[in-house]
Image: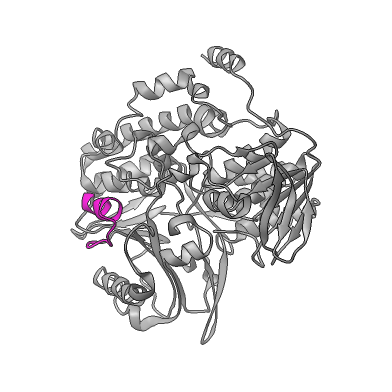
Amino acid sequence: MSSIRNAIHRLLPAPRTVTGPTDHVVVVGAGLAGLSAAMRLAGSGRKVTVIEREAIPGGRAGRIEMQGPTGTYHADTGPTVLTMPDLIADCFDSLGETMEDWLTLDPVAPLYRAFYPDGSVLNVHSDVSEMAQEITEVIGPEEAAGFEKYVEFVSKLYKYEMKDFIDRNIDSPLDLLTPDLAKLVAIGGFRKLAPKVREYLKDPRTERIYSFQAMYAGLSPYDALAIYAVIAYMDSVAGVFFPRGGMHAVPKAMAAAAEKNGVEFKYNTTVEKVVHSNGRATGVLTTDGDFIAADVVVLNPDLPVAYTELLGTEPWSVKRLTYSPSCFLLLAGSTQKYSKIAHHNIHFGKSWKNVFTELIDKKQLMTDPSILVTNPSYSDPSLAPEGKELYYILFPTPNLDAPIDWKEIGPRYRDDCVRVLEERGYIGLGDSIEVENVTTPLDWADRGMERGAPFAAAHSFGQTGPFRPGNMWGENIVFTGSGTQPGVGVPMVLISGRLAAERITGKDPSYRSRATR
């Protein structure tokens, strides 16, 4: 079968690459994708300059310091769930560095603790036999047997999707015509996610924990294709990790390794526009009036914003996009510890399908919320003052397409969130908070995210793979990040950095897709 696949790939044109010289590359934005691209480009011998408007690297994976009465809380402002760490290791490998010399990742166990409205609790484990035992004890042996069959299904999805549909540059729908496409069709990958999950998981508790990840793709499990169960594989089968020092330790380590290997970083510097003519960029102009010449420009800001603000254009492929829901984020430094929670906790309300109807179809706030609460100090006490706890509390909300005035409703919604959490078992949370930081959809927009949607354009069929905005424009401008291929999530944006670099260097002959390892 591999010989058939190779023969088909030989018949397809090679992925496009930039034309002209590529000696000096300017990367705009030091997010995870921009850093991934910069490290690979430096490893290939290019001169690389990274321009970042903030004082630190990380982009969405940022960090704020909240000063409490007895010390500092070190709070991550972006993603909290880290999976597939070998994709990070590959970035370091491209520089001849070893990830473990720069970064320590500890496994999170359990991956999640799920709380249900009937009072039951399910610990989610990456080990299949351990998880089957958990399901047997909480729900029953028949559900555990269904879970084991579900793992077989998502493992096949991952194998068939990763190499041909995620882990390579795609220029045309014809690039999808591989034997793996037929395999995906055969196993039901293009059916709707929710009914496909219910073929294996009959209990609503397991159905929820293995399909809520569709929200990351900006879709309801009832609308998403079953191929997005691959996120459940990355999230709940391949394992979850936490970096010592918090999630921001990842971009911090990546930037340090890149700088050691010759990458120049210009922090506190904002790019005003890309200077280009007839599709060819000659460099970037900063708000300070400095022109920085470049042979190639890589853009890591949110793709729609990069087009409109930096390139001064909005192609149809961008104008037509619809966006994922947003979220309300409360970072809280607290004097209260809750012994019943784990590192990552999901609190499901009684409502399930209606949650997505409200958020996506009606563009309303949830009346019966499902909530993510991460307790980073559970795994790394150094992130909070001694004897204190740090909480990352995320309530999904509609994006800015909804008629919600966040300036007016924000403070009231914050109080509603605390009230709901106290009803769900976080007794005394409101009184225990000694310092906090709130991010609303309006704040996400102010940070450069179109429609205030940190999960970018939704992964509907028409916005996936070759139908998602491509990562090249003109002759020598390349995009990276969640707005382009392959999409949203830490693993995907790390891959997008490699794909952006390969638009400049050509395919890396030493790279081997994780699906084939």
For image coordinates 35% across by 57% down, the residue present is 113
Residue 273 is situated, as x and y percent measured from the top left of the image, at 66, 55
Residue 439, position in %: x, y?
44, 68
Magenta-span inclusion, residue 364: yes
The quadrant in which residue 87 appears is top right
Residue bounds of the magenta highlight: 353-368
Residue 453 makes an appearance in the image:
no
Corner quadrant of residue 148: top left
Residue at the far bottom in the pictured view: 69
**For residue 464, side relative to residue 338 (left or right):** right
**Quarter of image, res 158:** top left
Is 439 placed left or right of 494 in the picture?
Answer: left
Please tell me which residue is depicted at 48% across the width and 55% down the height of the picture. 450
From the viewer's perspective, tell me whether residue 302 is left or right of residue 476.
left
Q: Position of residue 387 (x, y in %)?
A: 48, 79
Residue 63 can be seen in this image: yes
Give the residue drawn at x 67%, y 51%.
100
User: Is residue 250 on the magenta stretch?
Assistant: no
